[in-house]
Amino acid sequence: MDGFEQRVIALIANLDNVKFWHRNLERGKGFYINGFINHYPDFIVVLNTGHILLIETKGDHLDGSDSEKKILLGQTWANKAGDKYRYYMVFDQKHVDNAYTLPDLLNQIKQFSV
């Protein structure tokens, strides 16, 4: 894990409503969203409410040329999977449409309560 991934999951893991989290395995070995591209989100987070969150981290230094496609695929998956499933792409500071900064993501997750 890179530094941004470590920071993201450390903050998420410390939230009261997080039951557990899992570092998704790399390409070809872990869970992926099957679509026009196969997308392997970085983390799978399960909340005490039963919600399942897929989280893709993107350091601001990364190219991110595939980010819009991954966001579209993740949102489509979440909409088809049902109301207990969410997809989030999170950047450190960079603004990308339909993605989150880390503080925004943490606020979103805190909104889920039992």
Image (spheres, rainbow, N blue to C red):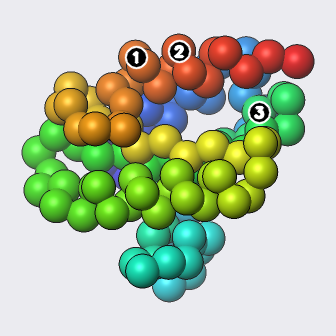
Provide residue 16's location: percent of width, then percent of height. 73, 15
**Looking at the picture, how far across and down is residue 77, in whole percent?**
60, 60
Kindly identify which residue carries mark 2.
Answer: 107
- The alpha-carbon separation of the residues under discs 3 and 1 comes to 18 Å
* Tag shown at residue 103: 1
Helix or strand or loop: what does disc 1 sit on? Answer: helix
In this view, the residue in front, 49 or 16, is 49
Q: Residues within 10 Å of mark 3 (few under 14, many from 20)?
A: many
Q: Residue at x 85, y 29 (%)?
A: 49
Looking at the image, do the residues carrying marks 3 and 1 touch, with CB atoms under 8 Å apart? no
Q: Which of marks 3 and 2 is nearer the N terminus?
A: 3
Picture coordinates of residue 55 (x, y %)?
Answer: 51, 46
Q: Residue at x 56, y 27 (%)?
A: 12
* Percent of width and height locating residue 10: 51, 29
Question: Which residue bears the numbered disc 3?
Answer: 47
Q: Which amino acid does label 2 sit on?
A: Asn
Which quarter of the rendered picture does the C terminus lie within?
A: top right
Q: Which residue lies furthest to the bottom in this view?
A: 28
